[in-house]
Amino acid sequence: MKREQTRLGWPLTVSEIEQVHQTALNILENIGMGKPPEELKELALARGCTLSDKGRLCFPPALVEDLIAGCVPRKVLPSRGGAPVELQDGLAHFGHIGVAPSVVDFETGEYRNSTLVDLYDLNRLFDVLPNMSTGDVPISPTDIVNTKNLGVNTLYSIMAATNKHTIVDMGSRDQLDPMIEMLEMIIGTDKKGAEAPITFIYCPTTSPLNYEGKYMSMCLEVVRRGYPVTPLIAPMAGAAAPATLAGALAMTVAEALAVLAAVQMVSPGHPTLLGMWPFVTDLRTGGFAGGAAEEPLLSAAAAQMIKWYGIEGTVPSGMTDSKLIDVQSGYEKGISVALAALAGGTFVGEAAGMQGSLMGASFEAFVLDQDMLSAIHRIQRGIVVNEETLGFKMVKDVINQGVGNFLGHPLTMKYMRSEYEYPKMADRSMISQWEAKGRPDMRMNARTRTRKLLSTHYPVYIDPDLDARIRKTFDIELPIQAMRAECGRW
């Protein structure tokens, strides 16, 4: 494999990355993966894998290396009409990729069970928020009458609300066929592989070091049908992974490579977007600690590993443990998303909107967090250094003209947009101006903006005739009346 041989940012040096990789290979060769599905076991044994005396599937390092080398990175996530996600452009793209059971009620601020209408509304919001790159599954609707219809209703609610690239949980095996049938009614049957405007996500392992048979088999079925998949490998350091961060990272990499190998054995060259999502345990309580300082360290290191393999992928961030939109929420999100992006994360999940250790999605928080994401994009762009930007002429002009400042200089006007990022929600006004406006805080501003966006943006991304056919074919529980501005919901 051809790999970068310079320091890949922070926190890991190339030597440390190589040590993590070798440990992951050692794990797969000498410990192996438990509970492999029969279809995968048969395929892997034919390729030179072995079974340990405990029945664990062990991978020869050379085979893993060869399968990694054959991966084709998924460089672009196409859309149905919105902007495609260009993963190779050097900037992080932000999305969600996670399923919360609750939403933070817009009116009361209380946590309540999520609904199908919430899923639709959140994706309408994603459709107009510039830093949300995809349609997504921030919540799992709890009000579905027939749970066998959860998959098609989730997919429908996303694709009706946004024409951005769709990321959706593949659900259960009995839901997969109708999901794909409806998908092909919407996008046609000719858009497969890297051309598909959709990515199926799934959790194919049960840590430590076991395949989750149901989801691994479903993954292989989706791959056979030609659609892209992204595994989310998410062991918790200190609980389902070693307490040492290096050990947790190495085990995450091992599980990720075991899943990647399975996909490549079934479909060589299948477009790859790899999800390494190591999480952190609060060792005092045993609970998930998404806002812990160790979480961005692990996410940044995972981003470096993915880049070193020459693959595109996703890492998690923005996972505040705060239940409120407050100082804790702001600093935990800002630190974690910035580190994941600056370490080379090309698609950063959980990047906005989530509160309470991923237990609740907040409409206002998704809007508020856009300022943070824009600022991180600005930081990633860095400083442009050339003869004009170094400013010798500007300094000479101002000194010679005796003006005393640079505000009126032509180059100030030229660069005021490209050099500077201006927040939409943060308040930079004078104290007296702020007081004259009624001393609003950011959440008040976000509520106003959120209500304005959601009261006016009711897109039609599925042709009405096609929509009628879909509703005749599938039990769609999202009321058509809820998809019209006159519903008065906002």
Image (cartoon, rainbow, N blue to C red):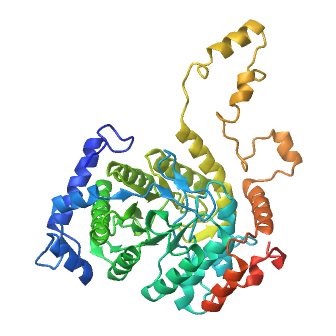
Q: Is residue 378 above or below residue 204?
A: above
Q: Position of residue 468 (x, y in %)?
A: 69, 86
The answer to which image quadrant residue 128 occupies is bottom right
Q: Residue at x 34, y 52 (%)?
A: 305
**Picture coordinates of residue 330, whole percent (x, y):** 60, 53
Residue 279 image-quadrant placement: bottom left
Residue occupying the point 28% across, 48% down: 17
Does residue 141 show up? no
Q: Which image quarter: residue 356?
A: bottom right
In which quadrant of the rendered image does the C terminus lie?
A: bottom right
Is 335 displayed left or right of 110 in the figure? left
Residue 226 placement, left or right of 66: right
In the depicted structure, whether residue 179 falls above or below residue 10 = below
Query: Could you tell me which residue is drawn at 30 percent across and 60 percent down?
Result: 253
Using the rendered image of the protein, determine whether residue 100 is visible from the camera's viewpoint.
yes
Task: Answer with left or right where residue 261 lies relative to residue 348.
Answer: left
Instruction: Spot the residue most to the right.
Output: 436
Percent x, y of residue 298:
39, 54
Q: Closest to the observer: 126 or 403?
A: 126
What residue appears at the point 52 percent right and 90 percent down from the top-left corner? 148
Image height check: is 230 above or below 88? below
- Foreground residue, 369 or 14? 14
